[in-house]
Image: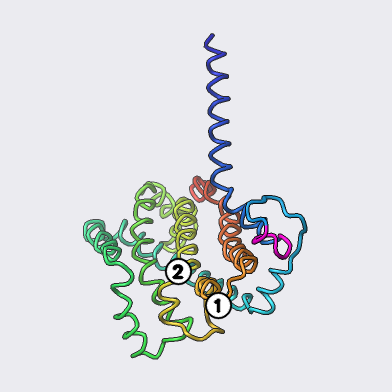
């Protein structure tokens, strides 16, 4: 009887999880399929799921005629640079807070998170004035600096919790074996907090990739425009082509999905690496 109940529970659990997965990924699947439908199918048969004719004309138009590839390169460069710099700064800052300034660091990390109390629109004018005074408006550098001002505080606060889980005894054992502070940090500690670093990298990358407000305010050159602003400009066109909109949406979503798929295997990795000689 217990075995039957267990089997029934497993079946129901798998059925529920399968249904939840289908519901979660259906919008993405719908966008992808809609982007490869033939001309006129989206407006003529909007509720039809499977396309009558498969075509990549929308992608060709978005990439070549609308120069969406330039916007993708801009966003990819900004997001990757922001993520790399944020991870380097926040990992060193979080480690320093945990190991060298535990009491002061706890207060500092809480103060850093208070930057998220202010809504982005409230800081739009101050950031615009500051970037204008240093000559960084309409530049990717200025946009990266703005993104870092939001990403680094949260990343430090997030990584502090992961660094606190690293036993001090492991570092002391490495120091006894002759490792210096830099070796302990890079070869011992970082592999142990790799899941936290990966999670922080995902958060930073997706936020920088999808950010719209400051990209719209600080950059007005179409050659430096990000994908979020470019996608919004398609919606503001006089005649909205839903095929182009769907194709552009796919191009915006795919990098985030691929980035997550590429590094999600490393989330579980590094839990014990570095502590074994």
Q: Quadrant of residue 34?
A: bottom right
Callouts 2 and 1 close, C-beta under 8 Å: no
Secondary structure at numbered mark 2: loop
- Residue under the image location 34 percent in, 50 percent down: 164
Tell me where residue 63 appears, x and y as whole percent. 67, 74
143 up-or-down from 204: above or below = below
Going from the N terminus, do you reach mark 2 or mark 1 first? 2
- Residue under the image location 47 percent in, 71 percent down: 82
Task: Give residue 238's mark.
Answer: 1
The span picked out in magenta is 37-44
Tell me where residue 150 appears, x and y as whole percent. 36, 68
Q: CA distance from mark 2 to mark 1?
A: 24 Å
Q: Quadrant of the N terminus?
A: top right
Q: Residues within 10 Å of mark 1 (few under 14, many from 20)?
A: few
As drawn, the residue found furthest toward the right would be: 53
Query: Label 2 belongs to which residue?
Result: 211
Q: Is residue 88 left or right of residue 45?
A: left
């Amino acid at each position: 009887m217990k075995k039957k109940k267990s089997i029934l529970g497993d079946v129901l659990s798998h059925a529920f999880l399968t249904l939840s997965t289908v519901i979660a990924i259906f919008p993405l699947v719908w966008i992808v399929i809609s982007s490869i439908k033939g001309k006129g199918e989206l407006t003529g048969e909007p509720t039809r799921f499977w396309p009558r004719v498969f075509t990549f004309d929308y992608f060709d138009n978005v990439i070549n005629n609308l120069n969406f590839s330039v916007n993708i390169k801009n966003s990819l460069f900004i997001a990757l640079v922001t993520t790399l710099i944020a991870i380097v700064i926040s990992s060193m800052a979080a480690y320093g807070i945990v190991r060298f300034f535990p009491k002061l660091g706890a207060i500092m990390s809480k103060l850093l998170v208070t930057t998220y109390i202010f809504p982005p629109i409230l800081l739009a004018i101050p950031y615009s004035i500051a970037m204008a005074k240093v000559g960084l408006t309409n530049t990717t550098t200025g946009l990266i600096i703005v993104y870092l001002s939001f990403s680094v505080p949260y990343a430090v606060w997030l990584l502090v919790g992961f660094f606190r889980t690293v036993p001090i005894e492991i570092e002391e054992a490495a120091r006894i074996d002759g490792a210096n502070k830099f070796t302990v940090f890079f070869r011992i500690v970082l592999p142990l907090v790799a899941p936290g670093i990966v999670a922080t990298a995902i958060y930073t990358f997706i936020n920088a990739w999808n950010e719209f407000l400051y990209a719209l305010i600080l950059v007005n050159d179409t050659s430096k425009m990000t994908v979020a602003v470019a996608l919004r400009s398609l919606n503001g066109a006089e005649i909205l082509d839903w095929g182009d909109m769907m194709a552009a949406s796919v191009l915006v979503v795919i990098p985030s999905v691929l980035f997550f798929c590429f590094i999600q295997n490393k989330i579980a990795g590094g839990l014990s690496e570095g502590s074994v000689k």
